[in-house]
Image (cartoon, rainbow, N blue to C red):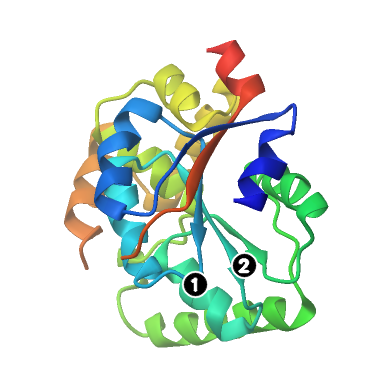
């Protein structure tokens, strides 16, 4: 509760809700439409909940907090689908700046975590090499989000609004993902996504950026 109170005092953030039950949180996601969901790393089944949240709200950024900053742990959360993390050693005063950095596609991390991520990427690349690598194009998390929203029938303008990014940035993501997939049409991206997208603990609270809401 102290973290919720601390963030509630920030001018740039609004606390939309608190939940200790994943089913209740999922039911409220469509209504609340948060930009950020903070997920307590200590809660049972937290990693399993990430995919369930993204199924309901693919545009939301899930940030796990109070997490042990080891390479294996951070990689496991990243593979689960989180957009960022806040180490358990972070002070209350530093939480809001970290959230803003994550919303800007930045994530401070330790040298050991960075090295662990590089090792994982290298090992994954070596595993794929020799097989049909075109089945596994190097799409970023954001490009995958854009692809999913394209498949949901959203226009570039609607995607920009859902993800809280500029229209020019959205167009750039679409251009990049079409190039990586070696296709020319959005409908082809949907076909690829549907063919390859398939090859949980409670939430603590959700937050949204006040600046983003005022511009909608």
Residue sitting at x 63%, y 23%: 210
What residue would you read off at disc 2? 66
Q: Nearer the viewer, residue 165 or 136?
A: 165
- Residue 211 visible in the shown view: yes
Give the secondary structure at mark 2: strand
Q: Position of residue 141 (x, y in %)?
A: 48, 53
Disc 1 + disc 2, Cβ < 8 Å: yes
Residue closest to the far top: 215
Residue sitting at x 36%, y 72%: 133
Q: Position of residue 191 (x, y in %)?
A: 19, 45
Residue closest to the far front: 1
Residue sitting at x 62%, y 67%: 66
Residue sitting at x 71%, y 28%: 12
Q: Position of residue 25 (x, y in %)?
A: 33, 45
What residue would you read off at disc 1? 42
In the figure, residue 26 lies in which quadrant? top left
64 horizontally vs 104: left or right: left
Q: CA distance from mark 1 to mark 2?
A: 7 Å
What label does residue 82 carry, if any? none
Tell me which numbered mark, 1 or 2, is placed earlier along the sequence: 1
135 horizontally vs 38: left or right: left
In the figure, residue 184 lies in which quadrant? top left
Q: Nearer the viewer, residue 169 or 92?
A: 92
Residue 5's place in the image compared with 80, above or below, is: above
- Residue 185 visible in the shown view: no
Give the secondary structure at mark 1: loop
173 horizontally vs 47: left or right: right
- Dot 1, crowdedness within 10 Å: few (<14), some or many (≥20)? few
- Dot 2, crowdedness within 10 Å: few (<14), some or many (≥20)? some
């Amino acid at each position: 509760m102290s973290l919720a109170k601390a963030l509630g005092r920030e001018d740039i953030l609004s606390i939309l809700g608190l939940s200790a039950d994943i089913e209740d949180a999922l039911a409220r996601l469509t209504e609340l439409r948060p930009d950020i969901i903070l997920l307590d790393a200590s809660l049972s089944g937290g990693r399993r909940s990430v995919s369930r949240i993204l199924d309901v709200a693919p545009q939301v950024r899930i940030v796990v907090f109070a997490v042990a900053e080891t390479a294996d742990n951070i990689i496991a959360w990243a593979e689960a689908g989180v957009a960022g993390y806040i180490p358990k050693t972070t002070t209350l005063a530093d939480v809001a700046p970290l959230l803003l950095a994550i919303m800007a596609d930045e994530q401070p991390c330790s040298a050991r975590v960075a090295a662990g991520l590089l090792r994982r990427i290298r090992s994954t690349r070596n595993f794929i090499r020799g097989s049909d690598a075109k089945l596994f194009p190097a799409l970023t998390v954001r490009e995958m989000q854009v692809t999913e929203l394209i498949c949901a029938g959203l226009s570039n303008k609607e995607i920009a609004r859902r993800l809280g990014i500029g229209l020019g940035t959205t167009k750039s993501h679409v251009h990049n993902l079409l190039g990586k997939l070696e296709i020319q049409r959005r409908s082809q991206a949907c076909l690829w996504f549907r063919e390859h997208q398939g090859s949980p603990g409670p939430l603590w609270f959700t937050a949204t950026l006040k600046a983003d809401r005022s511009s909608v």
